[in-house]
Image: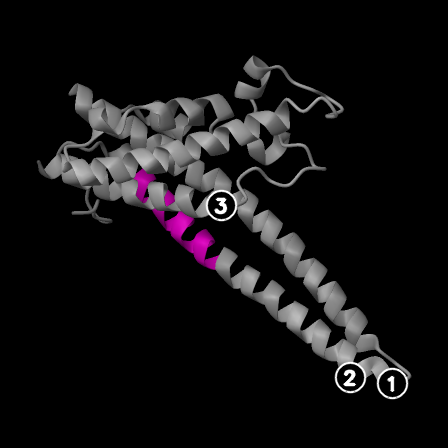
Amino acid sequence: MDVPERKAPAGLGSAEHEALVSLREAVSTLDAELRSVLAAEDRARVLQANAERRAEQARFAFEVEAFQNLGRAAFRCADEVEVLLWRYTSALTVLGIGILERLAAGGPPLSDTAVERLCEEPTLGEFERAIAVPVDLLLVREEDHLERKRKERRKLLDFVEIAYECLLDTTNPTPMDRPTAAGARLSVDHPSYMDRPWIGHLDTLVAVAQQTPHEIGRVLKT
């Protein structure tokens, strides 16, 4: 069972429902767009390589220059889309886990203000806290499913440590201590001279985020 788009199921507040549906759509679309941009980047490399071979005996090689620039543009675009995907995927993850915690505790639906706050990009510390919540407390599932979820969470906690290492790097012009880094938002505070810390982890994060509405729907059904 998944969370339906048109009507909030019993047990889910209207703000919770609308936010889940909206963020889920944003994440799914951005994930597809990122794959498209990465494919365009690959095509630019092939075009450049082919143009370089053709230009070996030619007087002019403007197509080589053009495809080099195309590749750079595709790279910049992919980087920006990754930032957007992190921003909305991390928000969906934290919101979803917050709702699962609320359901596990038997509390009332989150207020509009609380939901709006959870829809913002989380700080690194907020994301870490959400991911660290034991899945056994949130889900009523078979052991093999829970173990898969635990492995996903461990991968994301590894990612969190990589992000902390980047923010705590002593060569950073504005170095942070760990409490300060916990309050940072990666989309704006990650050092520009370093690779994004989510490289190699976005697929896991997207999978966790996209599964969260399904897990909420299952909890509501049971």
| Disc 3 element | helix
Residue 218 belongs to the span the image colors magenta: no
Q: Which mark is residue 85?
A: 3
**Of the image marks 3 and 1, the number of the one nearer the N terminus:** 1
Q: Which residue is mark 2?
A: 54
Please state which of the two labelled residues, at mark 3 or mark 1, is closer to the viewer: 1
What amino acid is labelled 1 in the image? Ala
* Secondary structure character of the magenta stretch overall: helix
Q: Disc 3 marks which amino acid?
A: Leu
Q: Which residues are magenta?
A: 18-33
Residue 120 visible? The answer is no
**In terms of sequence position, does the residue under pointer 2 or pointer 3 come before the other?**
2
- Residue at (63% x, 22% y) in the render: 168
> Badge 2: how crowded within 10 Å, few (<14), some, or many (20+)?
few
**Hey, which residue is sitting farthest bottom in the picture?**
57
Image coords of residue 194 (percent x, y): 68, 37
Q: Could you say which disc has been placed on residue 58 in the image?
A: 1
